[in-house]
Amino acid sequence: MTFDELGTPGTATVFEPISISDESTVVAEFVPDDAKESRYQSEAELESAFIKLLEGQAYEYLPITTAAALERNLRMQLEVLNSIEFTDGEWRRLFTEKIASANDGIVEKTARIQADHIQVLKRDDGTSKNIYLLDKANIHNNHLQVINQYEADGAHATRYDVTILVNGLPMVHVELKRRGVDIREAFNQINRYQRDSFWADTGLFEYVQLFVISNGTLTKYYSNTTRDAHLAEVTGAKRARRKTSNSFEFTSWWADASNKPITDLVGFTKTFFAKHTLLNILTKYCVFDVDRKLLVMRPYQIVAAERILQRIGTSTNYKQTGSVAAGGYVWHTTGSGKTLTSFKAAQLASRLPSIDKVLFVVDRKDLDYQTQKEYDRFEKGAVDGTNNTAHLKRRLEDPNSRILVTTIQKLARFVSYNREHEIYRQHVVVIFDECHRSQFGDMHLAVTNVFKNYHLFGFTGTPIFAENAGSSGSPRLRTTEQAFGDKMHTYTIVDAINDRNVLPFRIDYVNTFRLPADLTDKEVAAIDTEQALLAPERISNIVGYIREHFDQKTKRASAYKVGDRRLTGFNSMLATASIDAAKRYYAEFKRQQTDLPPAQRLTVGIIYSYAPNENEPDGLLGEEEFETNLLDASSREFLEGAIADYNTTFGMNYDTSADGFQGYYKDLSARLKNRDLDLVIVVNMFLTGFDATTLNTLWVDKNLRAHGLLQAYSRTNRILNSVKTYGNIVSFRDLEQATNDALALFGNADARGIVLLKPYADYYAEYAKLVAELIAVFPLGGEIIGEAAQKQFIALFGAILRLRNILTAFDDFAGNEILTERDYQDYQSIYLNLYAEFRRVDEGEKESINDDVVFEIELIKQVEVNVDYVLLLVAQWREARGDGSDREMEALMKIQRAVDSSVSLRNKKDLIISFVDSVNVTDDVNEDWKRFVAARRDAELEDIIAIEGLKADETRAFVESAFRDGAVPTAGTAITRILPPTSRFSATNNHAVKKQTVLARLASFFDRYFELI
């Protein structure tokens, strides 16, 4: 190339980049190898091939199988990383006090890696030195090694498959199963390791941050606290109060940047286990939140965050700041974790040396509160909220406030009050959440006209395209792309449902408005339809329908755990077309429930506020501000009365004043998330930006379309557990075409078949076929002989359980279950017997021999028999006792059947049967039960104290605390204080073994007696 070719001398030549890469964590496009192996591959061969792949990617293989060798290697690796040679005394102090402290568990070790990875060592000469466990600033300074078949002697002798060491610490554990085996068994295997042996020796395996499970064909990953929390639910250990993100449903697929899943172990290894990818995930793309849970980001979240950082860098270098070329928008569907993605993008952007401030902007005051709360959950104090414009000004002027959350209204007021300000010249990143509506109008221009050196990014689950753009406002700011720049990454609802990151929808259209047959379409158009839809008879019928079908739609017969609470069923929202409609519905619920006993009433709440336009012509949901003073007198008076009802129910003291209404909003939001409310009536509030995993049903009496429709529906489809399999939409208006149009716009032409559940007939036909097979192959009363037949029964009944879980929400299923209630109980008893037998085999074997058996225990638990029901049966038996009739025997068999078919009561069977034998005809069953259980509980605890040699008073106090708190504490010093003295670091590690043995016995004791009286 000659100088002449560069352009005219004295003029600037601009070069457009062809390719930009800062060693992206997620590969842009993955193309799998064409070569396919056809021969059978054993688990050992799969493991060997996996390790060979890692060695080819510069992992060092080590033949380490013992705790002593693991510790020696850790010492060497930390010496290399920190350019130091420890004396034996220095190493012992560092290891026992800073790395393997006797009182630290998984949570404490995770906190050390994520938030406290630099430890201070007091050297023998009195000086101090920082010791890095990880080098997060220069990730390639960290050394990766791979070990396999490590042997741990915990409650049972165990051998682990493959473990990745980072600077000598176990950070990633890989559990492999042979091809053809369900990978859920690998998930369950890791749970058994945690229970039996991760704590063993010096507890270094509790440093594992990520788990990978694979059968060669399918491969997934998840964080350590997903596994830890799942085990806590199983064993009754301390549970967190937030979301149940601890079951197999919360494991993730890896993918390329175009969202194509990389499921095969070979492809997964080449991408996820690429050194820079794995180290980036461990050091940048995990968030240890204030609930002390480790959130590991999904590939599409990482791509979006990195593309924002790349755009900041390149547009700054090319002097494009202050224009749409310096920004862009991210289209990630509602419910896919946009807030976590935006938080990580904001956090990483704020750490760039050239960036002065990051502004996170929302378009409503309620979202301001919700977003700051979410950000605070990711990292307490990481962001500053802004109460008003003056507060915003102070924060903008404070150099220590790196990330601010504010509303666009406050930001626009700040601009109008401050025509000149230093912040306008500073290098700022502005991130808009749900970038639509108000960001496109005058306020958008007011902000972008005064800021000179900015990058503007938007996140949305439902972009505004030309097809769904309104006709108002500036023609240059009608679509998301016009306002924010080009699309940087896409993850649609179709992607999310395929990945199982959100649930599909099930929609019922309930016709409540029938027009006279002699009316033509043109005549219908002339009717005041909305007024007709508010007819008292119609409102009464809809409320009656909701009350009649509430238990069915929200699965009130299903029980499950969320945190430390046992809940039955889910909750719901009713979306209404106007404040007038909301008021009428609330009054009708109140009227219909007046004479009902309190236990039969639904707990109903209502929230609305002033909105200039309740119905937007372009399908967007109208904005409801917090200004209740702008409501008409009648609406405000009605809301005041409804809030008074709420105060009476929950013992609060809110009203419609500015502060009182804001407090009401926050409290109602929390109670809806905690499932304290059965149903909340809304107009537009809560239909966007509100997440409650326990909410599964949206009752709709409102015309929705496009953006607003998908936003509203998506309140119901957050993943919780295997009981919640879809979001339930019950529409009292004909929204079928609007639904199809919205799915085509925000998904693709084939989205309907993925996003919506199949018709009832499809599920029922499969169910009927499986039940017929069950009855023919495994008739009740016959034996199931041999392991092959047992596994066939387990698979068949598990499939029936999964289908019943879906079918129970269909109106048509009632009365068509095929199996009688008794037969279903008997089959469930057989299923649970096999579950107990297979678990005993697994616990007795060094390696599980039941790799291909997966039990649907969570679906069994949802229809759980409780103690109150059994006591009712005991009372019936007592009344029949003594007459020697069939009635007496039938009552006794009912008790036996109820206990045998219950997951939680089976380990209490001997208690219940002994109690039945002790009851006489004149006893008060409930009082006798309390006395009986208390005596047996005390006697069994004294046996445990004597057998294990525990400190008696301390153990009794420990157990009382566990029953009071609802959990057995497994970490900290509480358990240590009740143990007899042993050395943590003895050669045989008696302390760890003893601790785990005692914990197992006390957890079993707790599980047996908790909530019995």
Image (tube, helix red, strand yellow):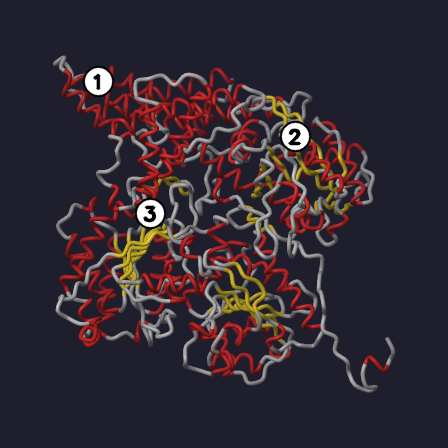
User: Taking 556 as reference, is 503 left or right?
Assistant: right
Q: Nearer the viewer, residue 331 or 990?
A: 331
- First-in-chain label (3 vs 1): 3
Residue 938 vertical placement versus 631 (above, below) = above
Residue under label 1: 919
**Is residue 805 shown to the viewer in this render?**
yes
Total labels: the figure holds: 3
User: Taking 25 as reference, is 84 left or right?
Assistant: right
**Label 2 amino acid?**
Thr
**Is residue 559 shown to the viewer in this render?**
no
Density class for disc 2 (Cα within 10 Å; few <14, some 14-19, many ≥20) is many
* Mark 3–mark 1 CB contact (< 8 Å): no
Q: Secondary structure at mark 1?
A: loop
Query: Which quarter of the rendering shows the C terminus?
Result: top left
Residue 179 vertical placement versus 256 (above, below) = above
Q: Secondary structure at mark 3?
A: loop
Q: What separation in Å lies between label 2 and label 1 (alpha carbons)?
A: 51 Å
